[in-house]
Each structure stands twice: as C-alpha cells, then as structure tokens.
Image (spheres, grey):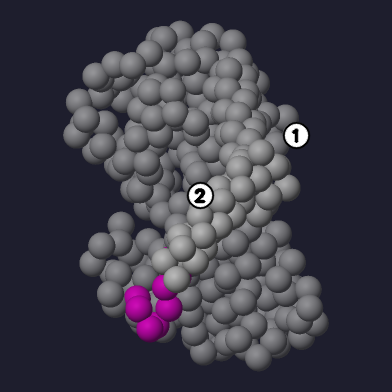
Amino acid sequence: MIKHYRRLALLTVLVLTLTLLAACGDPTATTAPAATTATKAATAAATTTAAAAATTAAVANSGLPKIAKKDKYTVGFAQSESNNPWRLAQSKSMQDEADKLGWKLVVTDAASSTAKQAADVESMIAQKVDAIFLTPREEKPLVPAIMKAKAAGIPVFLLDRNVDQTLAQGGKDYVTFIGSDFVLEGKQAAEWLIKQTGGKGNIIELLGSTGASPANDRRKGFEDAIVGTPGLKIVAAQDGDFTRDTGRKVMETLLQAHPEVTVVYAHNDEMALGAIAALQAAGKTPGKDVIIVSIDGEKDGIQAVIDGKIGATVECNPRFGPKAYETLVKYANGDTIPTKIINPDKFFDISNAKDFIAAAY
Ligand code: AHR
C-alpha cells in the first residue's frame, strides 16, 4: 500500500514538472497569450506615450518664443475698450491678480479702435515685456501684431476673444486662447428661448461689435440652433457694438420698422438693457410683450432677470486674472499648454438669479 502511494506521488511530481517545463519553453502554452498580450499592451502604451511626447514636443518646440522662469514677470494686457462693466471687470481681475503676485502689468486701452490695439501691442513689444495678454477687438486685423510679437520673441496669450483660425493658430503663432465657448452661449440662449416661447416669435437680434469673435460665434450658435424651429424668425439683426447706448439707439430704430417684435436676443446684457429702455419708451413691457434673452451675467443684467425684464442670461465670465497668470507660469515651466482653454460658464434665470447677484460685477 505504502509502495503504491510512493509511486503515485512520484508520478504526480513527474507530471507537474513536465507541464511546467512545457509551459516555459512553449510559446503556445496557456500562460503565453496573456504574457504576449501584456507585452503588446506595454509596447502599445510605450508607443502612445512616445507619440504623445512627440506631440508635446511639437507644441513646445513649434517655434513659439519661450519664457524664462522668474519669480516675478512684467506682462502686457492689451484691452480692447473699457466701455461696459464686463470689460472693466476683466481689467480689474487682471490687475488685482498681478498685484497679488507682485508682477508688473502694462495695461493699454484701445478705446474701441482696432488700429490702436495693434499699436498698443507694438508698444509692448518695444518695452520688451515677458508676455502679452491680448483680447483682440476683431478676429482678423490683430493677426499681424501677434506675428510681430512672435518674431520679437514675446509669447502672446489670447484672452476672451479669438482670432481667425485660418490666419493664426494656438500652439504655433500664439500660445493659447483662454475664454468662453461663444457658440455654446448662443446655442444655450436659443434653447431657452425655444422652450419659453413654444417655438414661436419674431426676433430682433442685437449683434456684438462687427468682426469680434463673440459676435460671430454667438450669432452662429443661436441661428444654427433655431434652424429647426420655423416659427422663430429673425426679423432684423444689427450691430449694437456691445454697449447700452448703441443697443438702445439700434432698438429704437428697429422697433419702428418691426413693431411685430416679440423677442430680443442681445449678444450681451448691456445691449439688452438698452433694448429694455427703448421698449419701455415705446410703451411695451419687457418680459411680457417682448421676451429678452442675453449673455454675460453682469450685475444689472442679473437684476433685470430678478425684475422679470430679462428672461435669462448666459454667463460669460470676465474674471481672467488667476487663469491667465497660472497658464503663463505653466508655460514658463515647460508644461504642455492646450491650444484652447475653455471657461466653464453658468446660466442665470429666475430660478437662481438671486443667488448670484451679490457676487456679480
Ligand atoms: O468678448 C466678450 C464680450 O465682450 C462680452 O460679452 C461683452 O460684454 C464684451 O464687450
């Protein structure tokens, strides 16, 4: 009996040993495919990482000027104009954050002149600032100034407004665009309006400044979104230059030609507030006779939502300071910077306007 068990044990050891030897030597043994898969995955991962590194290198070495690492920087901020609360809030955020960091900020105000803004950038180049933050008033005419800065070895960061992508690109001609998704803003305004009106209305569209990326994109986002709603018709669309006074004047004129208007879509709150004044002067009640939807979320705009005059306003956040300088520091450290950094924006209507009025600008 004992002999029998000994033989059985020897046989078992022999079988196990042979199985192990076969598994090690034979690539088709059961453990081999898993090992091969793991090897393939590791190789693929390494290849992907290598490709990603190459892309990163391509961005980092694509001819864009570098910034030396420093404790404090001197940077330029070329503002397009200072004629509405949004732009004042943007400039304040840039200055406050620069003060907090102890950086020197060279600020210019182009006072609504695209030519002056281009000259402002050139003056910053002459002053040899470390970097330029530019909010291009129009999509096309600021491109030569961006190219001059690049040629002078000064990196440009676009803030809030973009340039024509066929003329200049992020990661190649300028570092990045930081700002809102303007097409989405227009789309959100349209979607709210479709729900609110049941898909019927005669719309006056107050456009932002001609040639500015938010004016082009907010128009596109809105108009594309109402294409499938034939009951919503744009009866007139005109440039209100993003200001309250021009918005009011344009609305006064358009109201005479289109007394059938039931909706105003304004590309910013200031023009919506101008439209409210024009509607009231014409004996119409904003929010009842005419539904208003706009963009920005400034204090007066949110107050008009609370008062029932503006139905909804899509946020466009002007507080760029922290994100702008944090991006510069990352760039100086050699980090990969995405060619677009999109701000997350809120949406204000009667359900939440009271919660945000205190923090508004
Ligand atoms: O570029 C952002 C737009 O410009 C804001 O909506 C507007 O108020 C500003 O002038």
Q: Is residue 4 visible?
A: yes
Relative side of 306 to 255, left or right: left
Report x, y in % for residue 107: 36, 27
The disc label shown at residue 166, or none: 1
Q: Amino acid at mark 1?
A: Thr
Q: Quadrant of residue 206?
A: bottom right
Would you place residue 190 above or below residue 285 in this image? above
Image marks 1 and 2: residues in contact by CB distance under 8 Å:
no
Give yes or no for residue 350 being in the magenta stretch.
Answer: yes
Would you place residue 291 above or below residue 295 in this image? below
Label 2 sits on residue: 342
Relative side of 129 to 169, left or right: left
Q: Which residues are magenta?
A: 346-353
Q: Label 1: few (<14), some or many (≥20) within 10 Å?
A: few
Report x, y in % for residue 39: 62, 40
The quadrant the C terminus occupies is bottom left
On whether ligand 1 comes within 8 Å of the CB at mark 2, the answer is no
Relative side of 125 to 300, left or right: right
Q: Residue drawn 63% across and 67% down?
A: 187
Element type at mark 2: strand
240 vs 297, nearest the viewer = 297
Q: Quadrant of residue 92?
A: top left
Give yes or no for residue 88 being in the magenta stretch.
Answer: no
Q: CA distance from mark 1 to mark 2?
A: 20 Å
The disc label shown at residue 341, or none: none
Q: Nearer the viewer, mark 1 or mark 2?
A: 2
Q: Amino acid at mark 2?
A: Ile
Q: Residue drawn 49% across and 31% down?
A: 336
